[in-house]
Image: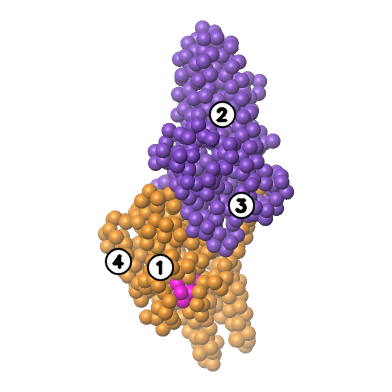
Chain colours: A orange, B purple
């Protein structure tokens, strides 16, 4: 299993995803601020992994509180800091809210008990995420025909979750059932999660993978070289509108044009049941230097204006099915996606 | 005017486009082989510029022939070498065929005369290309509304031609008429012609330009932030099917989905009147390391399999109009695109 994030001796350890696959470097984080910056700077990324990191971040802050401190005030400070790290992925807020509920329910037991209970809750979030991914994989692999060539975008793999992955979990499950599949990985500019992380994961698992640039998918579809598309998600509204890594929407339009199935794989913690459509999902605009650089090197004039939306929103009508830990939901989604689902 | 290519003291001088915009480095080429490699390695690129480079390359070879040599044999060797440099851009073959005709018509006048005549023909090809671009600009700017935000892909600018550019020529002409326009430049992986060359050209001309990654166009179209798309071409068949830089086809599909005009700007030397459709246009597959690297740096596992088609083919039905030096041709193209056109 890949070491996305772990709690170790009262500290949070994560692989620095900015340097993969060329360097495998681990960071040991000791403060809430360090975890918050790791999320902001994309040391760790991927909606479920961000949620787990936030849960451990809160735990870390509380672990180091000394007797006599105002725990409510401190908890609230940690919570706010982590809440503000990234705006789009639903799992971040979901995990923080879940931790807060547990904090509030057990607050009266005193600091030593709260420390234990929060750590145990963060560990549960991590453990459950792994189990959820396995379930998503089991359901989702039914949608993968033997012999399929599967296009995926960004990294919805072990590195984006507690392990196994959502979209890559489906691919792993299909591969484990001996289906003869091939994966095309979009490099996913500007941060290159496809070229760096998806390629690395699939090569390690010996799943056949071919790297392409983001602008090649249309041409390969025109030539009949792609059987289906599967991606993860950062936030899903009740009508199926899905925020995911920039470029996802273009792939969904191209898939429709070529009558190719387009699937989203995500845990229920990615769903925002408060939103009836994707219209109000906040789309993060990141540092322009991410676009001005590739890897760690400038590729253009350092002062050129840039747009850098990190996500886009794909209308539910372009998504053939959404795969969750409770099964496959086919479009149309209206009325099917409720917090009481299924 | 930008110094794409020039004949100087019996040598061919070109800016090395692989290093722009971070380094402005000039190469002085003295042999046919050097010119052939400069084309293959994309020191110079862009269909019209490749044609000019090939014409000068032939000239260079013939200039250095000594009396008594078998000029037919030598000419044929030079011609074959240049012919094999790149397969897709029509202008390469057009320029070589034009030079060959002149060679054959004047062959009997002897080597000194042939040297002069070929140099004069290559210079004419260069000079005409510049005039053609200005005409394309004059016609094409009529299609650009005041206030438009224009998406362009790759570099169809001064650096892809003798100067001024095709798609960027249209943009320059609209800007010269004081239309308030903004340009979005796709970075154009893997070779980054947009981020490196288009950005550089437009910043020099003070035309407002914003850089985006290739996977952002769909999202910006969905948000109504793109008025039209204009690109160059490498080869155009009689039905309007157009080979152009990889990613062009995806943009055309996205433009259709969002009802945004999609224009191609190209000289008649880019048309292949022998081809009724784009089906038989050869699409070059380039070195996988172009995809494994960004700039001059590996971004992924150095051994991962890669696809690297340098071009794709956009069906004529997705192209709203083609702008040539003889005017604007609107779809459908069947019957309109003939060698006797207009």
**Which of the two discs, 2 and 4, sits closer to the camera?**
2
Query: Dot 3: few (<14), some (14–19), or many (≥20) neighbours within 10 Å?
Result: many
Q: Secondary structure at mark 1?
A: strand
Q: Are marks 2 and 4 in contact (CB under 8 Å)?
A: no
- Asked if badges 3 and 2 are on one and the same chain, I answer yes
Q: Secondary structure at mark 3?
A: strand
Horizontal relation, residue B153 to residue B287: left or right: right
**Residue A39 painted magenta:** no
Q: Secondary structure at mark 2?
A: helix
Q: Which secondary structure is most common in the magenta stretch?
A: loop
Q: Residue at x 49, y 32 (%)?
A: B339
The range drawn in magenta is A234-240
Question: Mark 1 and mark 3: span between their CA atoms?
Answer: 35 Å
Q: Which mark is residue B150?
A: 3
Q: Are marks 4 and 3 in contact (CB under 8 Å)?
A: no
Residue B280 at least partly seen: yes
Q: Are marks 1 and 2 in contact (CB under 8 Å)?
A: no
Q: Are marks 3 and 2 in contact (CB under 8 Å)?
A: no
User: Seen from this angle, which residue lies furthest top?
Assistant: B68
Chain-order first, disc 3 or disc 2: 2
Query: Dot 4: few (<14), some (14–19), or many (≥20) neighbours within 10 Å?
Result: few
Query: Dot 1: few (<14), some (14–19), or many (≥20) neighbours within 10 Å?
Result: many
Residue A292 x %, y %: 61, 52
Question: Mark 1 and mark 2: span between their CA atoms?
Answer: 50 Å
Q: Residue at x 50, y 74 (%)?
A: A277
**Residue A235 painted magenta:** yes
Chain under numbered label 1: A
Q: Are marks 4 and 1 in contact (CB under 8 Å)?
A: no
Q: Which residue is mark 2?
A: B53
């Amino acid at each position: 299993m890949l070491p996305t994030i772990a709690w170790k001796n009262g500290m949070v350890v994560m692989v620095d995803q900015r340097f993969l696959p060329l360097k495998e470097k681990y960071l040991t984080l000791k403060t809430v601020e360090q975890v918050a910056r790791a999320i902001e700077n994309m040391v760790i990324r991927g909606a479920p992994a961000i949620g787990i990191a936030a849960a451990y971040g809160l735990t870390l802050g509380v672990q180091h509180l000394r007797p006599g401190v105002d725990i409510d005030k401190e908890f609230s400070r940690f919570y706010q800091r982590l809440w503000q790290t990234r705006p789009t992925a639903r799992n971040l807020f979901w995990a923080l809210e879940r931790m807060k509920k547990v904090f509030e329910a057990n607050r009266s037991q005193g600091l030593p008990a709260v420390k234990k209970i929060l750590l145990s809750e963060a560990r549960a979030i991590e453990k459950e995420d792994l189990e959820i991914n396995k379930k998503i994989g089991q359901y989702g692999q039914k949608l993968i025909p033997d012999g399929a060539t599967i296009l995926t975008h960004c990294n919805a793999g072990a590195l984006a979750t507690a392990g196994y992955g959502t979209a890559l979990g489906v691919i792993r499950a299909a591969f484990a059932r001996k289906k003869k599949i091939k994966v095309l990985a979009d490099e996913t500019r500007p941060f290159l999660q496809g070229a760096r992380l998806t390629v690395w994961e699939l090569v390690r698992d010996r799943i056949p993978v071919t790297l392409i640039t983001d602008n090649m998918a249309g041409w390969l579809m025109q030539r009949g070289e792609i059987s289906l598309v599967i991606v993860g998600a950062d936030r899903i509204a009740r009508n199926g509108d899905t925020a995911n890594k920039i470029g996802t929407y273009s792939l969904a339009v191209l898939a429709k044009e070529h009558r190719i199935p387009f699937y989203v794989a995500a845990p229920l913690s990615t769903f925002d049941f408060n939103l009836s459509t994707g219209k109000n999902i906040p789309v993060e605009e990141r540092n322009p230097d991410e676009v001005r650089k590739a890897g760690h090197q400038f590729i253009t004039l350092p002062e050129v204006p840039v747009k850098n939306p990190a996500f886009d929103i794909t209308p539910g009508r372009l998504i053939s099915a959404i795969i969750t830990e409770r099964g496959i939901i086919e479009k149309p989604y209206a009325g099917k996606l409720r917090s009481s689902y299924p």
